[in-house]
Amino acid sequence: MCGIVGYVGPKDATPILVEGLRRLEYRGYDSAGIAVISGGRLERRRAAGKLGNLEAVLRSTPVSGHIGIGHTRWATHGRPSEENAHPHADASRQLVVVHNGIIENYLELKERLSATGIVFETETDTEVVAHLVASYYEGSLEAATGRATKDLRGIYSLVLMHVGEPGRLVATRLGPPLVIGLGEGERFFASDVQALLAHTRRFVFVPEQTVVVIEPDAIRIVDAQGRIVPFKEETITWDPVQAEKGGYRHFMLKEIHEQPRAVRDTLLGRMSLDTGDVRLEEMGAAALEAIEKADRVQFLACGTSWHAGLIGQFFMEQLAGVPASTDYASEFRYRDPVISPGTLAVAISQSGETADTLAAMREARSRGASVLAITNVAGSQVTREADGALLTHAGPEIGVASTKAFTAQVAAIALLSIFLGRRKGALSAAAGRNLLAALARVPQLMDHALSCAALVEDMSRSLFKATDFLFLGRGVQYPIALEGALKLKEISYIHAEGYPAGEMKHGPIALIDESLPVVALIPRGRGYEKILSNVQEVKARGGRVVAIINRGDDHVRKILGKEDLFIEVPGVEVDVLGVSEIFSPFVTVIPLQLLAYHVALRAGRDVDQPRNLAKSVTVE
Ligand code: G6P
């Protein structure tokens, strides 16, 4: 989604804005632009397409100044073009604005402003904001912005600059995130901390429905009634180097390889192997109380995080004995969900900013649920709205296709489920010890699973020309089949479907022929024999199988033919409650992530920034 950067201070704003936008590229965008105040004038440079195009414009018509705003646009209203790119200016070219979000009543406002003689230059909803604020301007951008927000409906994060006030930037938000970065004698705005890690680790998260003014040495935040709002400075511990590629060709590949570390860090300090229990005191007393009294769990999430929720359902029911369901956050509000008083809603979100997830979580709360957040970003909106947050420690995830955040989420949910299982008496101390010992081994097994990388790269040679793929799994492997299909679709643009293997005969079987690769997840465990029967059904119809199997599983290998492929991953056995395969998703997902990566690479796709996709989706 759109990315925002702003700077005010002693340095030249232009390179800071462009570099900040580069670090926000991963969010997804299709045009970019900056504006700076230079020699008492507003100067804008914009371009459709990637940042390289904007840089070319800046090389041919350079611009510099000590204050500026920049934007990467992910088109919603109006096609990606130079004129629709932000920043947008008012008619007198005194004021510019950048915007992330959607102004829902923009047509109504456009009509009102047009009636006063204003001529609109673009098809965007954002241009309305520039004219609206200008119409209220009487010497104070802060006051005019505050006045304009009363007319706006929708969601927005806005940063504005006025040529008459060349030492300050003004911002306001409702929905999409915005942070203030604090440097020495300089201040920044950005959509997320990643854009600014090269300059500072000190941040203030902009509260909703306030107007914020930054000057080189000052921050002022006021609420809708004009009262000063106190703010807290937070220090982000992420190492800026973690947000670099570190020798890997793409962020996605680096992040796939970082998974053992991400899972280890998420488990670290939270497992008591002696007592067979999980320590979650960090979540605070209110959250722990909500967890303990939960008699039902409702996961809410989007995209890959929704797949983590589906796995969480297995964990909650099998380990904690608590009924659990998972909803698409974007659908939850539209089915009038029935929420019983003991419901614990768990919002899962890597970014902590996904608009639909936030809305679903508010819906659950309004219907009486307690709300927890599982997120990768400390200080993000979900953490501020939930009763407690369980952080995944995956580190910054830059690749649009989520990998390490997913396995870290699964680890966090496993901890939460064991914690609840122990509280509910579903797990004895011995069972808890057993499960935690198995979890503790997971990072090492993931390391072993990564050794299939070269083989998968080689296999991609014979697979990247396929136009469709089918992914099959049973039980806890079914969400992994969905995730494997999603990864492939996202970055290779090849059509893929994930299916519960048993459902194949009710439809997808009609698709099977020699041109359709069928990726089957067959680790040992409950569904093993059954999915092998499904593999036989595929083979009987001439389908080509790519089997994900446990190391040394000769039985499956005998069933496979010469034309089939197989990838071996280590088994993750747990000797408890008859759920030996419960943690197998941690390793079976790895070859599927690598498969998507290598197929996309061979197909010549932009792996880290796939077309049309955004990393955090801050509009509904
Ligand atoms: C976007 C991203 C996905 C992500 C989903 C949910 O679609 O491209 O990778 O899974 O949003 O994001 P969240 O930050 O809430 O986990």
Image (cartoon, rainbow, N blue to C red):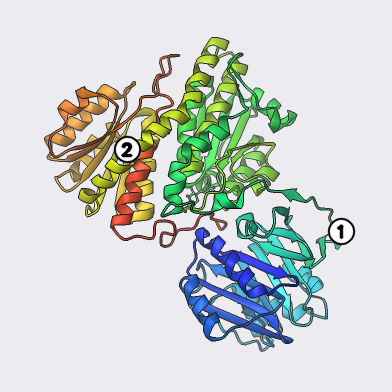
- Going by the numbered disc 2, the residue's amino acid type is Cys
The percent position of residue 488, horizontal first and vertical second, equals: 34, 49
Identify which residue, 302 or 503, lies in the foreground: 302
Q: Which residue is mark 2?
A: 452
Determine whether the beta carbon of the residue marked 2 sits less than 8 angstroms from the nearest atom of ligand 1: no
Q: Which residue is mark 1?
A: 228
Residue 201 in view of the camera:
yes
First reached walking from the N terminus: tag 2 or tag 1: 1
Q: Is residue 553 left or right of residue 14?
A: left
Element type at mark 2: helix
Identify which residue, 225 or 524, lies in the foreground: 524
The percent position of residue 329, horizontal first and vertical second, equals: 53, 45
The percent position of residue 560, horizontal first and vertical second, equals: 16, 31
Residue 104 in view of the camera:
no
Q: Quadrant of residue 85?
A: bottom right
Q: Is residue 558 left or right of residue 337?
A: left
Element type at mark 1: loop
Tell me the number on the disc at residue 552: none
Q: Is residue 51 above or below residue 402?
A: below
Identify which residue, 407 or 75, lies in the foreground: 407
The percent position of residue 544, horizontal first and vertical second, equals: 17, 41
| Residue appearing at x 71%, y 59% in the figure | 181
Image mark count: 2
Q: Is residue 616 above or below residue 418?
A: below
Q: Is residue 461 left or right of residue 86?
A: left
Classify 10 Å Cα crowding around label 2: few (below 14), some (14-19), many (20 and above): some
Q: Nearer the viewer, mark 2 or mark 1?
A: 2
